[in-house]
Image: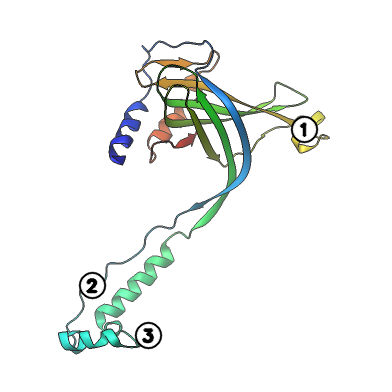
Amino acid sequence: MKTFLLLVLLLTLSPPSQDTQLSGDSSPMTVVTFKWSRSKRSVEKQDTSVTPPQQAMIPQNKNFARNARVNDPAGVRDPNADTLDGRRDALEKSVQESRAPQAKSLEGFLYKVKLQNSSSKVIEIVFWEYQFIDSKDANLVTRRQFLCGVNVGPAKNKDLEGFSLAGPSDVISVGALGNKPEQALQEKVIVNRVEFDDGSIWQRKGWNFHEVKLTYDRVLKEPWSPGMCKPL
């Protein structure tokens, strides 16, 4: 079932057709709530386990001796560790572990939004952005854009979250520097594009898909799962 859902997601995330009719009327998704916070994401360490070689036929591995070792107290050394194969296995495992990248935490930011499907159709894909607007200069806007694979029925809500290494603001005007951090920036969430299960598309007027074309192509090559959001 998971494989089928992933296949559907990848098919719906194919590059948009130029022949698809786009609409710029009111958004079919309503923003209910939104917020952001600092966050950490751990990068999983690669599996460096080594398949142990077939145990050498030493006296301790014969049936009677092997069965007797089941009752050995904890801490008794495995006789296979002293064989040529055992020593080779331990050395190979040590080398691979030393070369493998260590697990680490990424410092970043988590952007959350709750959206409601206000249309009469099922929504499969949504492009949205979290905006930070300078309180002293409305022309200074920082945008954190995300692409999400969703399945939201009519009148249903959907909680989405996107993780990004980029923070709330790239630039703050000199006039806003004297304000408290919570007053220096105004925040809002905008839905840029919605793709329905019948193949139709709604897109906000003024938003250009080609602005995110390069990052869009990149994220399509990354692992996906239903309900996941990727930064653009």
x then y, percent, for residue 180: 80, 37
Whether residue 85 is situated above or below residue 41 in the rendered picture:
below
Q: Give the mark nearest the N terminus, 1 or 2.
A: 2
Residue to which mark 1 is pinned: 183
Q: Distance of mark 1 from mark 2, alpha carbons?
A: 63 Å
Residue to which mark 3 is pinned: 74
Q: Is residue 149 left or right of residue 51?
A: right
* Three-letter code for the amino acid on which mark 2 is drawn: Pro
Q: Distance of mark 3 from mark 2, alpha carbons?
A: 23 Å
Q: Give the mark nearest the N terminus, 3 or 1.
A: 3
* Three-letter code for the amino acid on which mark 1 is drawn: Gln
Q: Distance of mark 3 from mark 1, alpha carbons?
A: 62 Å
User: Is residue 232 visible in the rendered structure shown here?
Assistant: no
- Of marks 3 and 2, the one in the foreground: 3
What scheme was used to colour the molecule?
A: rainbow
Tell which of 218 and 47 is nearer to you.
47
Residue to which mark 2 is pinned: 53
Within 10 Å of the Cα at label 2, are there few (<14), some (14-19), or many (20+) other Cα atoms? few
User: Is residue 184 visible in the rendered structure shown here?
Assistant: yes
User: Circles 3 and 1: CB distance less than 8 Å?
Assistant: no
x then y, percent, for residue 194: 46, 21
Q: Indicate the quadrant where residue 172 lies.
A: top right
Whether residue 114 is situated above or below residue 94 in the rendered picture:
above
Q: Is residue 124 left or right of residue 28?
A: left
Whether residue 140 is situated above or below residue 94 in the rendered picture:
above
